[in-house]
Image (cartoon, rainbow, N blue to C red):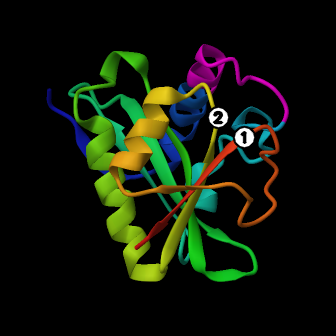
Amino acid sequence: MNFMIREILPQDNKQVENIIRTCLIEFGANHEGTAWADKDLGRFSEIYNTVGNKYFVALNENDEVIAGVGIGKISDLEDVCELQKMYCLKAYRGKGVANELMKTALEFAKKHYKRCYLETLENMNAARKFYEKYGFKRVFEPVVKTEHFACDIRYIKEL
């Protein structure tokens, strides 16, 4: 499968929002306490094109956004970032897209941070195995309080 990874552009915002909403519906997470209710959903190119923040998208051969992942600064924690809004359309899972996105995101994170945190849901089994494959270790207390109170599984990784 051919795909390309690049930094998000303003014209990608709506496609990324649609991917996230599609995936959240698939996993029954289309409710408060998840990315579903984020006030900035759809403003990725503005939010992530700042120092220490970056959002990457994967495009298929038709230049359609099929997946994305962000690295975001965590307020009050200078050396810890958060892996944010990593979603891939179902038709493109298992084809190496997420692996390349993760490698790209972690390369960026290593330049700015010492550790990377993430929150997810218990029923996202494949995602949890994927994070563990990349060396994320489960933690049982939040590193920071986020607006994603419905996320019941947390991980951290040394960079």
Q: Nearer the viewer, residue 150 or 147?
A: 150
Q: Give percent across and percent down for residue 52.
A: 53, 75
Q: Nearer the viewer, residue 95 or 149?
A: 149
Image point (63%, 31%), residue name: 122
Q: Which residue is mark 1?
A: 151
Q: Is 72 a magenta residue?
A: no
Figure disc tally: 2
Mark 2 or mark 1: whose residue is earlier in sequence: 2
Compared to residue 127, the image places residue 69 above or below, namely below
- Residue 131 shown left or right of residue 49 in the figure: left
Q: Nearer the viewer, residue 143 or 94?
A: 143
Compared to residue 26, the image places residue 82 above or below, namely below
Asked if marks 2 and 1 touch (Cβ < 8 Å), the reply is yes
- Look at label 1 and name its amino acid: Cys
- Residue 111 shown left or right of residue 72 in the figure: left
Q: Give percent across and percent down for residue 71.
A: 51, 61
Q: Which residue is mark 2?
A: 121
Q: Which residues are drawn in magenta?
A: 21-32
